[in-house]
Amino acid sequence: MKKLTTILSLLVLMAFISYLGWRSVEHEVLLRENNETLLVKSRINNIKLSIESLLNQRLSYLSNLASQIDNNNDKADDLLATQADIKNIFIVNKNKILFLSDFDDSQWHKLVESIAMDNSVLFKQQDHSEQFEPSSGWYQMYNHLIYWSIKSDNIIGFELSNIKFSFDVISLLDKQAFEDNFRLSDGDKQIYSNGEIFDNEISIVLDYPLQNWHLTYYYPSPNLVNLYLLGAGVIGLFLIVLLGLICYAYREYSRTLRLAKQQVSFVGQVSHEFKTPLTNITLYSEMLSEYLEDESAPIPDYLHIISAESKRLTRLVQNVLTFNKPNSVNIRSVDLTLLLKQIYHTFKPILAAKSLQLNITKLDSDCIVNTDEDCVMQILNNFLSNAEKYAANGKQVDLSLIKSGKQVIITVRDYGEGIANHLLKQIFEPFYRVNSSITEGVSGTGIGLTIANQLANQIHGEIKVINQNPGMAFSLILTEQGNENLNC
Amino acid sequence: MKFIKLFAMLGLSVCSLFSHAEPIKQIQVRSELSSPIILEGNPEANYLKISLTGQKVDTNKRVPLNLAIVIDRSGSMGGDRIEKAREAAIFAVNLLNEEDTLSIVAYDNEAEVIVPASKVKDKQKIIQLINKNVIAGGGTALFAGLSKGIKQVENQLTKDKVNRIILLSDGQANVGPSSVNELSELAIIAAKKNIAITTMGIGSGYNELLMSSIASYSDGNHVFVNNSSELENVFVHEFTDVMSTVAQDVVITIQLKEGVKPVRLLGRDGVIKGNQVTVKMNQLFSNQEKYVLLEVLPEEGKVGQSKTLAEIDLKYDNLLVNKAEHETQLVSIAYTDNKKLVQDSIIQDVLAESEIQKVTLANEEALSLYDKGMHAEAEEMLMQNSSRLASFSNMMISPSSKARINSQIEKNNIMVDAVKNQDSNVSRKIMTQQQFESKSNVIKK
């Protein structure tokens, strides 16, 4: 079940990463398409500008010609004959047509008549402020494109030859040799075409008076397949690397776990072998203490220590054997003060052997807590034996029992080299040993604090480690819980 | 006495015109009236003919060409046609030399300059380009193709070269401006730049009015090529003509005297403004006579009177000596009451041409009848015109006039034959080409 959840959450994570990756690829695609569109727009504008500048050239050229005509019909005839740009000419003076070429074209004729009748039509199509009336400009009607200019009451109009203009546009575009793909049309007549036709197109209409002209620009979709492939590849690679890392980590983890289990089972087997001799030691030391009950002062005490220690070792072995199984906890009212004194007496000679002075710095009296005596003792034993093993150069170990409110805090303080703060979390992990000069040459299983922690959890206590510098302070905090009475 | 004196004078002037008094002159200009002596009183229509004749020149020393070949490579050209067009273009490349400028434009949906205007140096490369790019497929963007052709010729435009475009097409223009008016306007633009466009219509699918209009407005040739295998022959003719160009940019201004009325120009088009008539010709070939025929109504006069009828002003670029030439001639008219004298003085060549032009106009009507589907009426009209010419021919004494009339009779017979035996698409093209030839006022020598 747990495995399934892990796999599922892993899949969800991968899906999420893929989704994010894909979204960023799509974003990139959108960005590129947008860039492409912008580029195309600037290109199409370029083409548009060159066509419109050609028309502007015609404008200045025609305005120059208009100033030459000046009511001279012969000159107008001459221009018609020589200037291919001019298809027709009219001169209107105060609603009267003075000169008009090509009478036969009735549409043209009518158009000029309408201008003669009311020349304000010329202004209407153009953008200009209300007050200001331009004196020249373009006028576009039907398919006639007229440049008009007002010179002292005369309106001179040139009809620009569409064909000549188209011809010039073709020449111009050919000369500029655009590498773009576009079509230029006047209405439905294609004037110029360059390159190929692609799926994507942008169309624009030229400005007045070429509003019938439209320019269509074609461009291929940017080659996004590569981008998609690249994106997918990167995402895939990332996922594979991630999966690989997870697999590697899992393998390492299971390997360590296997090793630990092997270690545990080894310790278990060895411990099991200890049980029989220990039982015998306990049995015979008890028998001996009964036998030598009446001996003078130190002998019964020594025997008592032997039997107590062998019992402790038995319990320890038992604990190791049941490392993974919850211990049966025997909760009852325990006088911690008494227990601490007992421990003090037990450890004083052991520590003294390592030239460590065990002191009781504070001992609050009458601390009776509902807890498991063995557990507390084992935890404290663990603390003290650690101090003995690793803080031997501290000369001194302090033991204290403090009650504060509902809590009882039993602290073992050494004055050794201490443990770096960042390692404090790991010292409770099974088989972890701080790798430094202090652990060198000292034998240990690496499960002492683990068991202590486990035991503390069982009796609803808590172990706190504080770096006191110099030395460490290991505290067991017992709290009144539920029906447990903290009776200090 | 006066008549004799007058007659002698006239005879002398005519003699001087016919005699090769000036052998250096490659271009002969002649202005004559069909009836130089007319009866007093009500004057009748008279015909003023101004002709330019190019003399045979040394073919080794020809004028360089500035030629653009504009080839239709639309889908309809597929197969034999495009192949023949390619061959014709390659044939043209081989005819040219390093002095000549050539450009090649091909068009389908769009126009592409295959060979930009440049001197013909690396023929192999040009031929390769032709073979690679002249491949059929697509629409007919005739406007764009012709525009680019004009532009190419214009890029290398000089007065000392023959500037010409050969346009090959077998279809209806369908991309871009395509109407007869629009393309005629383009042809006029070309003509204003002194570029002539020869149009060759291949097969029966093209628009004969469009193609002949382009040719006539730019003073080029128009040829109907029914079978693409004839294309090379047509090219030979065209090149023989073009390579023998002796004069270019000819402007003839006829200033009629007060009281003389211009009625109409027969054949070649021009501008009649008041008493001034202006006609332009793009070029003159060495083996031809090109003329302007103006119908005039002379002023009334008295017996014995002799007046100047018109002042002819001629300008042209003589390509052989690379010089702009200018010439003025006077045409006078005399009045008498002697009918015999009037009859004798008639210049039959001029009269024959006027008759040919009138018949051409009548043929035009036949053509429009034919267009309306009245095939039988058109045929009958053409036959009538033919017999009208035949009877006119009998009145002619001059062998050259007879020959000219007979050649027109031949043309009419070709048209009658086309109307009878060909399907309407083909016969329309044959008639258009015949009419185009008649209207172009050219006498082949």
Image (cartoon, coloured by chain):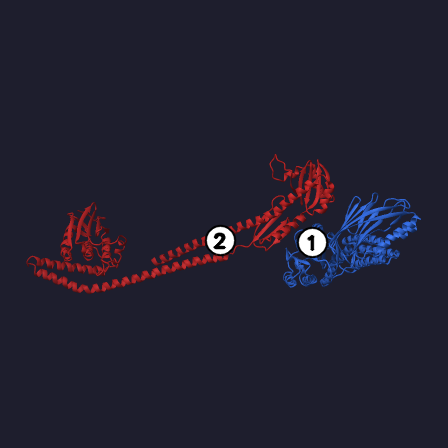
Q: For the residue marked with disc 2, what is the amino acid?
A: Val
Q: Which chain is red?
A: A
Colour assigned to chain B in the rendering is blue
Q: Quadrant of the C terminus of chain B?
A: bottom right
Q: Position of residue B248 (x, y in %)?
A: 74, 53
The quadrant in which residue B283 appears is bottom right
Q: Residues within 10 Å of mark 2 (few under 14, many from 20)?
A: some
Separation of marks 1 and 2 at Cα, in angstroms: 55 Å
Q: Position of residue B130 (x, y in %)?
A: 65, 61
Q: Is residue A341 left or right of residue B298?
A: left
Q: Is residue B376 left or right of residue A224?
A: right
Q: Residues within 10 Å of mark 1 (few under 14, many from 20)?
A: few
Task: Assign a secondary structure to mark 1.
Answer: loop
Label 1 is found on which chain of the structure? B
* Foreground disc of the pair 1, 2: 1
Q: Are marks 1 and 2 on the same chain?
A: no
Q: Position of residue A399 (x, y in %)?
A: 17, 51
Q: Is residue B380 above or below residue A273?
A: above
Residue A14 in sight here: yes
Task: Assign a secondary structure to mark 2.
Answer: helix
Q: Nearer the viewer, residue B301 or A386?
A: B301
Q: Nearer the viewer, residue B132 or A331?
A: B132
Q: Position of residue B180 (x, y in %)?
A: 71, 51
Mark sitting on residue B158: 1
- From the image, tell me which residue sits under label 2: A29
Q: For the residue marked with disc 1, what is the amino acid?
A: Thr
